[in-house]
Image (spheres, helix red, strand yellow):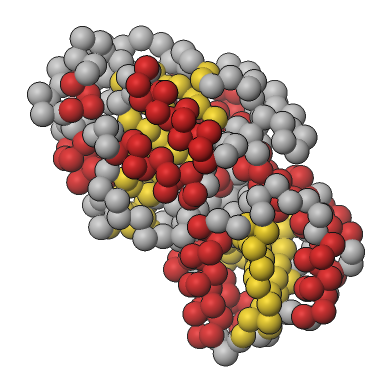
Amino acid sequence: MRSTVNFPARGEPAFPPSLLLRNLTSSAADFALSPDDRALGRGRARSKLRIGGFICCSGSPGVWGPCATSSAQLAVAEINKRGGILGREIELSIYDAGGSTEEVVDRAEQALAFDDLDLVIGLHTSAVRVALRKVITREGIPYIYTPVYEGGEQTPGVVAIGETPRWQSRPSIHWLAEAKRAARWYLIGSDYVWPWQSHRAVKRYIAETGGYVVGEEFVPLGEDNHEPHLARIRAAKPDVVLISLIGTDSITFNRAFGECGLAATTLRLAGAMDETVLLGIGADNSENMFCASGYFPGIASRANDDFQSRYFTMFGPNAPPIGSLGQSSYEGLCLLEAAAAKAGTLAMRPLLAAARNIVYSGARGPVIVRDGRARMSMHLAEADGLDFRLIKPI
């Protein structure tokens, strides 16, 4: 399969504006389901394991949609080649999780009512996760949420495996305080739950270093006029601007940040940042930009090398650029395969119990999940043109 992706203009979907992209996999062998599995009981007469990928394909986070979809397709192809999940071959359907929360919830309700889903994988904002988890889990369907998030997800039926502030932001803040003598911080983020909750944690970590916050603001999703924000930042004279903007909002902000000259004098530490966003920002505007993540394409490891080799073999040289957020959908399916093998069933309760305490392997290498909290190798990097140069493990 070969995929060529152009970045969408603001507001345009990264995929055709259909509700559902069907038939991403082939048929499977039969598998007998546990009679106490409410969700999967509806599908005893069929053999496929129907997974709904709720992935942002439009709106500000839509830049991650192409890589996320390709990464999920790769994982599905690999799992199916190994015989599927407990003998059932996966059928993956992609639903756009962009747009308003109300629109996404409506799509989810339609999918659950008419498409007979067995499990949901999600790569979208935490605001969407908070709304979707009620809709999904009441049907007895497991829900695996994969991207960086604020932490603390304990809803029965939901497993979140992304980076959290405790392991992503805290060591980065301490390093910038020590290595760059950063003391004055300005916080800017998108106006929803992930930046709200992350900033609360970040303020504690800044205080631990003896630093302090000189300004904070939250920006509506889709905002691309950043002159007022930049004027307030310039007036506050921070050493570091911590950025919790997402997708195209982060792109337009960081472009404007560089173009107005702030990049030469002010450090930036970004949360939901990867090479996909960095490509949009451009090499001229990425000076003094730092990021921490559990995954970078430049990590030298056998697991990463093998993942990238398989990815480009499947999708070709014009495949969607690999980034940490999009790649996380691959991780989610790796977790599913390992948890199902441990539980020996796809019934929600034992499957999710297995997923809350497990070690699985993906492109990041081994990831340890304990009591529903994922721990992985974390890396600090600095933007170097259109790539990230790894500084150190953290």
Which residue is depicted at the point 41% across and 56% down? Answer: 376
Of all residues shown, which one is farthest toward the left? 35
Q: In which quarter of the image is residue 233?
A: bottom right
Q: Where is residue 249 in the image (x, y as percent from the top left)?
A: 71, 50
**Can residue 190 be seen in the rendering of this structure?**
yes
**Can residue 67 be seen in the rendering of this structure?**
no
Q: Where is residue 72 in the image (x, y as percent from the top left)?
A: 48, 30
Q: Does residue 3 sit above or below 165 in this rendering? A: above
Residue 157 appears left or right of 231: left
Which residue is depicted at the point 79% across and 81% down? Answer: 237
Q: Look at the image and tell me in which quarter the N terminus lies.
A: top right
Q: Where is residue 121 in the image (x, y as percent from the top left)?
A: 41, 35
Which residue is depicted at the point 35% across and 55% down? Answer: 153
Q: Position of residue 291 (x, y in %)?
A: 62, 61
Residue 93 appears left or right of 358: right
Of all residues shown, which one is farthest toward the bottom? 210
Q: Does residue 332 sit above or below 46 in this rendering? A: below
Which residue is depicted at the point 20% across and 46% down? Answer: 353
Q: In which quarter of the image is residue 87?
A: top left
Report the number of discs. 0
